[in-house]
Image (spheres, grey):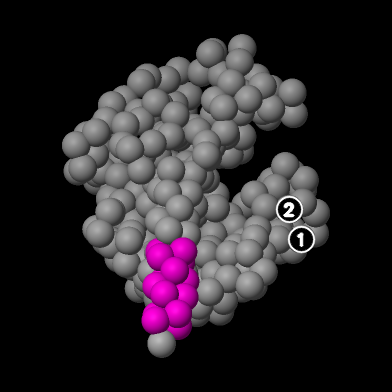
Amino acid sequence: MRKALRALLISFLFTFSLGFYFTNRLIYMKKKDEQFIVQREKEAGRFNPEHFESLPKREVIIDSPFGYPIKALLVEPHESNRYVIISHGVTETKINSIKYMNLFLERGFNAMIYDHRRHGESGGKTTSFGHYEKFDLKAVIDWLKNEKGPALTLGIHGESMGAATMLLYAGMLEDGADFYIADCPFSDLKEQVSYQLKKEFKNVSTLLIPIADFILRLREKYSICHVSPISVIENIQHPILFIHSENDDFILPAMTKELYEKKQGPKMLYLAANGRHAQSFNENPEEYRTVIDKFLQKYVEKASH
């Protein structure tokens, strides 16, 4: 009997330790080196420092409701009330948002790019995959609306975690933009975590996720169950363009398909033939531009006339 209890205790402690290790990996996910991001984007031709420097812009520091600064850039080459906010993915910075920013600048929009908490030049100690980030996004939106007035036409483009953050903002806090573009979001963090765990640990204990979630609640005051775009997607009335690479094996395209199916009202879906995770634009640039144009023409241009 004692041996069985000892074995059970050891098994529980091992699972608890693994759960603590796993929450550490989540909230302190290893970020890409910022200079690496700059160099990667430059070498790929997606970031031209000379062109970027020539754009009329200003740095903005916005207060997060959680007490740290959010660093943003407001880029305004156009005399226009049309703006787009770019919400980048986990481990990236606002430098990765420049390629999307340029796409919208070419279409007559001004843009705002910013660093999520614990990324780039923004403050914050942990990553929450959209739970706390959605409030920061609202702070960015509120600042822009206050600065530019109520006649704003506003879009939000999000990639990966940035797309999930955007959907959580629109579905849980307010449907506060005129249109959304969700590029490779996860539909449910618990499902995404389960999928990644099974890939990494073949024989993972079924106790690991509930224990890790319990630890996360203690440490960060939220549950992974709270980070579920699929559970709030029906609350979003404004148009959404969903984008995903068919070969994405990090966040499966089935997640975007589920989001698209559950979304009510105006929507479009683009499944890119080439590229893996967050590579739809990089590997299919012309198709990506064409889909953006169709979406804007159908749901934004007509609405503004």
Q: Which residue is located at x 61 percent, y 12 percent?
A: 50
Residue under the point 74% across and 23% down: 43
Is 33 placed left or right of 136 in the picture?
right
Q: Which residue lies under the disc numbered 2? A: 276
Q: Which residue is mark 1?
A: 247
Compared with residue 39, is residue 160 higher up or lower down, i.e. above or below? below
Q: Amino acid at mark 1?
A: Asn
Residue at left 28%, top 26%?
61
> Distance from label 1 to label 2 (Cα)?
5 Å
What amino acid type should be assigned to the residue bearing mark 2?
A: Arg
Is residue 268 visible to us here?
A: no
Residue most extreme to the front: 2
- Give how far across and how far down residue 106 sits, in percent: 60, 34
What range is drawn magenta here? Answer: 2-16
User: What is the x, y in percent for residue 57?
Assistant: 42, 20
- Is residue 41 depicted above or below 275 in this figure? above
- Residue 7 in view: yes
Q: Secondary structure at mark 1?
A: loop
In the picture shown, does residue 174 fall above or below 115? below
- Viewer-side residue, 203 vs 95: 203
Residue 131 in magenta? no
Residue 262 appears at what percent x and percent y?
50, 79
- Comparing 183 with 78, the one in front is 183
- Dots 1 and 2: beta carbons under 8 Å? yes
